[in-house]
Amino acid sequence: MGIEIVTHQPSETVSLGYKIATHARAGSVFCLTGDLGAGKTTLVRGMAKALNIKTVVQSPTFNIMKIYFDGRRPLIHIDAYRLEGVSSDIGLDEYIGYESGLTVVEWPEFVAGLLPNNATTIEIINLGDDNRQITITSEDKDYLESLNKWLQY
Ligand SMILES: Nc1ncnc2c1ncn2[C@@H]1O[C@H](COP(=O)(O)OP(=O)(O)OP(=O)(O)O)[C@@H](O)[C@H]1O
Ligand SMILES: [Mg+2]
């Protein structure tokens, strides 16, 4: 099952991230795919907002992982870009799916072996200008249904 939506400016992608995180169950893992500059981190900013995290979410250019603890649940933000071709046995699996938090992974293909089968996948395609096609796929039908209802408003 999936949901497809097109955003036309960064703030719409932030708002989608907000809705995605608001409905998420604790322990959920989100895999964010899309080219450089597609809008993955932009979407994570909306997720952080939904958790009431005040710290500004930045592209973790120098970090592989950052955990935000200042919201109503932890947000584990992993950017695996620089793990391409590197052994992923660096203990990240301890944090992915951390039970009380939400985990979001940019460049999940580089840590594929560490990700749970039931992860929600979010694919962002740059359609040119400020348009982005975002496809959310999950096995969790209840989650997708409640998210979809909210998106209809
Ligand atoms: N509809 C849109 N949604 C999201 N970002 C958009 C949109 N339109 C334009 N942008 C711009 O695209 C860029 C997205 O950057 P962002 O850091 O979120 O990408 P990313 O996918 O995380 O890249 P990277 O792989 O380098 O981490 C920003 O400069 C943002 O302003
Ligand atoms: Mg990014």
Image (tube, rainbow, N blue to C red):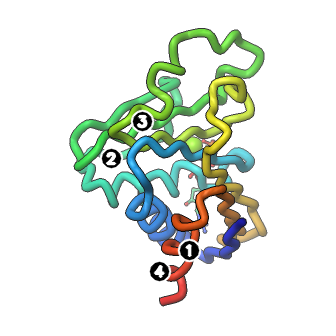
Label 1: which secondary element: helix
Q: Amino acid at mark 2?
A: Val
Label 1, on which residue?
A: 145
* Position above or below: 35 against 18: above
Nearest the eye: 137 or 56: 137
Of the numbered discs 1 and 3, the one sitting upstream in the chain is 3
Mark 4 vs mark 2, foreground winner is 4
Of the numbered discs 4 and 1, the one sitting upstream in the chain is 1
Label 4, on which residue?
A: 150
Label 3, on which residue?
A: 76
Q: Amino acid at mark 1?
A: Glu
Label 4: which secondary element: helix
The picture places residue 67, in percent across and down from the top left corner, at: 36, 32
The picture places residue 144, in percent across and down from the top left corner, at: 57, 68
- Do the numbered discs 3 and 2 sit on residues whose CB atoms are within 8 Å? no
Residue at point 61% right, 51% down? 120
Q: Amino acid at mark 3?
A: Ile
Mark 1 vs mark 2, foreground winner is 1
Label 2, on which residue?
A: 56
Mark 4 vs mark 1, foreground winner is 1
- Do the numbered discs 1 and 2 sit on residues whose CB atoms are within 8 Å? no
Q: Amino acid at mark 4?
A: Trp
- Measure how far apart labels 4 and 1 are at the Cα level: 9 Å
- Measure how far apart labels 1 and 3 are at the Cα level: 25 Å
- Measure how far apart labels 3 and 4 are at the Cα level: 24 Å
Label 3: which secondary element: strand
